[in-house]
Image (spheres, rainbow, N blue to C red):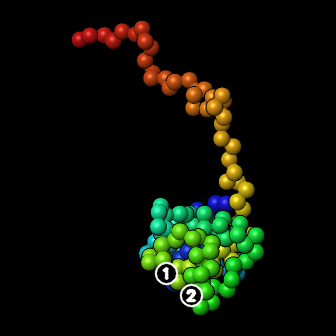
Amino acid sequence: MDLSKILSIAGKNGLFKVVSQGKNTVIVESIVDQKRFPAFGHEKISSLEEISVFTTGEDISLKEVFKSFHTKLEGKPAPDPKSDNQALKDFFGEMVPEYDKERVYASDIRKMILWYNILLMHDMLDFKEEETVEPTAGEPQAAEQQDPPQTGADEGSVTPEN
């Protein structure tokens, strides 16, 4: 799942896909209603790929939060993001038990649940591509098989002295 082309724009509800980029604008399309419009450089635009969640240990990416939702909810939608704050915190605590309760606010949880439900409803959550095959100890890695880069000078060449 590539979240780098999925954006959140401050002051606008929902999520947006990048359609095209201009010099000072990004043309985006609403995932919900497919309306296109320009998003300007002065607007606060965040790629979902860059968002992480505070935890008691190391912060985790939003992708990992969505993966946890998807796994624990068995691919079903999350509860209504308009639920009361305590219900949202309880739900999020089940999904991401190590989240930092001091720094993750109910409004943040509400947004993440809303975003998850939007992506799920539009079939944009795909966690299969993340399963990569790592080389075993006996297999050489691709970087080891490449020839060293050429420097442009032969080893036996002599440069003239002045």
- Give the image location of residue 134, x and y in percent: 65, 41
* SS at mark 2 in the image: helix
* Residue 88 image point, x, y percent: 60, 83
As rendered, which of 32 and 23 lies closer to the eye? 32
Rendered view: 62 above or below 9: above
Task: Assess disc 2: are there few (<14), some (14-19) or many (≥20) residues with their C-alpha within 10 Å of its C-alpha.
Answer: few
- Pointer 1 residue: 105
Locate residue 97, reporting x and y percent. Answer: 57, 71
Residue 78: percent from left, percent from top: 69, 78
Judging depth in this view, the residue of 89 and 157 nearest the camera is 89
Q: Which image quarter: residue 119?
A: bottom right
Q: Looking at the image, which residue is at 76% across and 75% down? A: 76
Which residue is label 2 attached to?
86
On screen, 18 above or below 92?
A: above
Q: Which of 1 and 87 is in front in this view?
A: 87
Q: Is residue 6 visible?
A: no
Numbered label attached to residue 96: none
Q: At 53% across and 63% down in the image, what residue appears?
A: 60
Seen at 67% across and 70% down, the residue is 69
Q: Is 123 positioned to the left or the right of 130 in the image? A: right
The quarter in which the C terminus is drawn is top left
Q: Nearer the viewer, mark 1 or mark 2?
A: 2
